[in-house]
Image (spheres, helix red, strand yellow):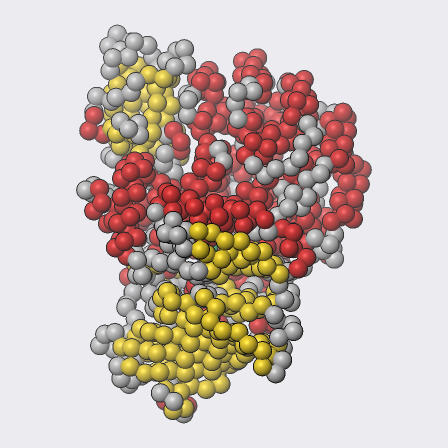
Amino acid sequence: MRDAQPTAIQLTDYKEPAYEVVETHLRFELEEEFTLVTSTLKIRQLGESNELFLNGQELGLESISIDGRVLGEGEYTLGDESLMLTGLSAEHTLQVVTRIYPAKNTALEGLYRSGGMYCTQCEAEGFRRITYYPDRPDVMSVFTTEIIADAGQYPVLLSNGNPVSEEVIGGKRHVVWHDPHKKPAYLFALVAGDLLVTEDSFTTCGGREVALKIFVEPRNIDKTAYAMDALKRSMRWDEDVYGREYDLDIFMIVAVDDFNMGAMENKGLNIFNSSCVLANPATATDAAYQRIEAIVAHEYFHNWSGNRVTCRDWFQLSLKEGFTVFRDACFSADMNSATVKRVEDAGILRTVQFAEDAGPMAHPVQPDSYIEISNFYTVTIYEKGAEVVGMYHKILGAEGFRKGTDLYFDRHDGQAVTINEFVQAMEDANGVDFTQFRRWYKQAGTPVVDVLTSYDSGAGRLTLTLRQHTPDTPGQTDKQPLWIPVQLGLIGKDGSPLTVTPDQEEFWTESSQVLHFREAEQTFTFSGLEQEPAVSLFRDFSAPVRVNYQQSRETLRFLLRHDSDGFNRWDAGQRLMLTWIDDAREGRFELSDDDINVYRELLNDTDLDPAMVAYLLALPSESYIAEFSGEIDPLAIHSAREEVSGALASALRDDIVACYQRLNIAREYEPDPAHMAQRSLKNLALSYWSRTGDDGLAAAQQQYQKADNMTDQMAALRALVNSGDRMRAQSALDDFYERWQSDPLVVNQWLSVQAGSAEMATIEHINDLLAHPAFDWRNPNKVRSVIGAFANQALSRFHSADGEGYRLLADAVIRLNESNPQIASRLLAPLTRWKRLVPSQSQLMKAELQRIMQQGNLSKDVFEVVSKSLA
Ligand code: B3K
Ligand code: ZN
C-alpha cells in the first residue's frame, strides 16, 4: 500500500542494468511461521555506473554482506521498495538474508501458502517479495536453489532445472536444484508440499529422454491424464511445426488451488491453477478439457518463446505473450477444428478486446507507460498481440513465417530482447520492409474499415473501395493508416468460388488470397466477371478490425449457405442475427421463411462438423451484441435477444428435437474432437428445446439425472437454471451441490452457473452465494465464479436500474484491494465501460468508481484502473 500518488513508468526511460548477476544461489528454510531466504549473488559490473539497485517489497531484512563482510546500516540505502549499494567495484559476492511470511501472503505474489503447500508466482514482479534482487527481465542468471523443510510435512521440494541432491538430516529434508539455463528472476519457482505425482516420459527429436511429472494434492491424482497427454502432444508439435526441442532432462507441472491467473511458465517447473490442469470426465466439461489442452501447450511453448528468448522489459510483454498465444492457437486448431478455433478467438476479440480498446484502459500492443504492470496482462497484449503475429503469417505465408521465427530463435537464444527484434527477424528472413506494419504495435484502438462495392455489369467489373481509420484513444490521436491483410473471396451465383485477381496485382498475394490494404483509402477493381459475385471479405478473420459493410439479408443468407470459408459463414450468420436483434429492439421483429429455411438446412446438414453447426445456430452473446451497439442498453439487449431466441426455438422446434434425439446416444465419454462436437450440438439443441415448453425441460431433467459426464450434466443444469422454472432449477442445484460438495472445482461451476444466469442472479441470490460455506474470498477462482460471472455474464442483473449490481461489485473491489490487489483490479473491467452505457446507468457506474477512488490506501493496481476510468 502506498502513501503518495503512484507514478507511471515510461518505456522511454529504459536504462540498461549497471550489474549483471552471474550466479544466483538461493537457500530457503521453510519454518511454520516464516521462511528465511539467504540469497548469494555473484555480481559483475556491466557499464560505467557502480550503483547496484535491488528491488524488494514487504521483506524483513536480516543482514547484508559483501564478500563475507557484514555491512553496517550506513553502508547501504534502504528504500520502501529498494535497496541500493554504491561505490562497489567490478566483481563481488553479495549475500542478503530476508525473512518472509508466506502464510500471510494473500496477494498470491512471491512465495505463498495455498492450502497445505508452498508455491511461488514471480511474474511480473513477485520475486522482489522473496529477496532483494535486480528484479527485471534483462538481468539473467544461473540459479541454484536449496530448500530445507520438515521432512514429514513436505516430502516434495521442487525448483527449476535438474535435481542435484536430496537428504534428510534431523527430520529436515534438504534438496538442491540447479538450472543450467540463464533466466530472469520472474521465471524462478519453488514448490513444497505433500504431493503425489503422475509420471511419463518423452523422447525428443534429438533422441533425449525427458521425464515428465505432474504433481497434485493426493485427492486429485485421478485428474492428471489429459494434461499429460496434452503436454506430450505439445512437445511433439513444437518440434514439428517450429523445430523447437526441449532443453532439460525433466519437465514438471504442479497444480495449486489458489492462483491469480491460469498458469505460469517457470523454467522446467510450470505452476498451474488447478482449474487449468485437472480433469476427468465426471468432473470437467469439454470446455475445461479444451482450456487445459490450450494452457498446457501455451506454458510449454513459452520454453522457447519467453524463456530461451525473453523480454528486455515489461513493455515488450506481447513479444512473448502475443507470439505464444498465436502458437497455442495454431496448436489447438491443428488438434481440433481450425474453423471452430477461429470463431472462438474472433468472438473473444470482438467482445472483450474491442471493449478494452474502446475504454479508458485502451493501450497499444506495445504500451509506452504503465503504473502497475499487472494491469497489462490484457486481451490487447495477449489476443490482439496474437492477431498481429498471425498477420505476418497471412502476409508471408507459412514458409516465410517459419523462416522468420527460425532466424529470431537462432539470433536471440539466451537474450532479453524487444518486439523490434522480432519484426527485424521477419524482415531479414524474408526481405520485406515492415516499417508501416510496426504501427500495429504502437497505435491503440480498433481500426474501422468501411467497405463499398459496386458492380458494372456492362464492363463485368467489380469495384471495391476500402477506407480505414483508427479512433482516438486516451493520449493518442491522429493515427496513421495500417497495413491490413484482407483475405478475400468472390462467389458466383451458383455458390461456387470465382477466380480472384485484382487489376492492382502489386497489392495481391495469390497463394494466400490476401489483398494488401495500406492507404487511408484504396480502390481495387476485379475485371472479367461474367456476373455480379457475392463478396467475402476478411476471411478467416484476417485482421483484428471492425468492418462496416452493408450487405443485404439475402446476401448474408447466401454467404451463410455457400461461403467456402467457414469463418465467414459463421460471420455472415452473426451479422444476420444482429439485424434480427435490431428489429426486435424496434419492436418489429419477425423471422422470415427464408431465415427459417436457411437455419433448418444447417441444423439438418449432417455433412457439416456438428461443432460448427452449434456455433452457426448460436445467437451472439449479450456482450457481443453490446459491442456492435452504439450506446449500450443492457436491458434492451437482453429482452431483444430473449425474443429472438424464443422465436428461433419455436420456429425450428421439430428439427431441434429431432437433432437432439439423433445425437443423444449413449456412448463412452471421450474428450476428442468428434465426441465433443456431437455433445456441443446436442446441448445447443437442448438449450433451445428447453425454452419451448415442458417436454424440453423434462428432457433436460432426464439428461441431468442420467449424465455420466460433466459436460452433459452441466449443460442440462444450465438449461434448467435458465428456464425460469424455479422449482426445477432449485431441486437440480440442490442435488448437484449434494453430489459434488467435496470437489472445489465442480463447486465453482455450480457457483458460476447461478451467478452468471439472468434468471437467477438477483442481488439477494449473489449475496447468498457469497455467504455460502463453499465461497472463500481468498480463493481467486471462487471470486471469479461468483463476482466475475455475475458482472460479465448476467448483464441484465448486473446493470439493474437501482445500481445495486454496481454497488456489489465496488464493495468486492474495495474488500479485495487490501488482500489481493491483482484480483480486485481485474474485477473492475465492467465498471470501466461506464461511458458507453445509457445515461441513467452510466451515472450510477461512475458514482461507484468515485466511491472506490475515495477509499484511502488504494493499491497501485486499483488506483491505475479507477483513476484512468474517471479521467
Ligand atoms: N506469463 C504468465 C502470466 C503471469 C501473470 C503475472 N501477473 C502466464 C502466461 O501467460 O503464460
Ligand atoms: Zn503466456
65 horizontally vs 466: left or right? right
Task: Indicate the quadrant where residue 100 lies.
Answer: bottom right
Q: Position of residue 30 (x, y in %)?
A: 57, 76
Count of labels shown?
0
**Residue found at the far top of this picture:** 458
Q: Can you say whether 167 is above or below 673 in the image?
A: below
At a point 31% along the width and 73% down the height, the residue shown is 20
Q: Position of residue 760 (x, y in %)?
A: 71, 42
Q: Can you say whether 553 is above or below 74 in the image?
A: above
Query: Considering depth in this image, is 233 or 825 the residue closer to the camera?
Result: 233
At a point 62% along the width and 32% down the height, the residue shown is 679
Task: Indicate the quadrant where residue 485 lies.
Answer: top left
Query: Considering depth in this image, is 645 or 664 the residue closer to the camera?
Result: 664
Can residue 708 be spotted in the picture?
yes
Q: Can you say whether 663 is above or below 782 in the image?
A: above
At a point 50% along the width and 53% down the height, the residue shown is 201
Task: Indicate the quadrant where residue 188 lies.
Answer: bottom left
Q: Position of residue 266 (x, y in %)?
A: 46, 61
At a point 62% along the width and 76% down the height, the residue shown is 150
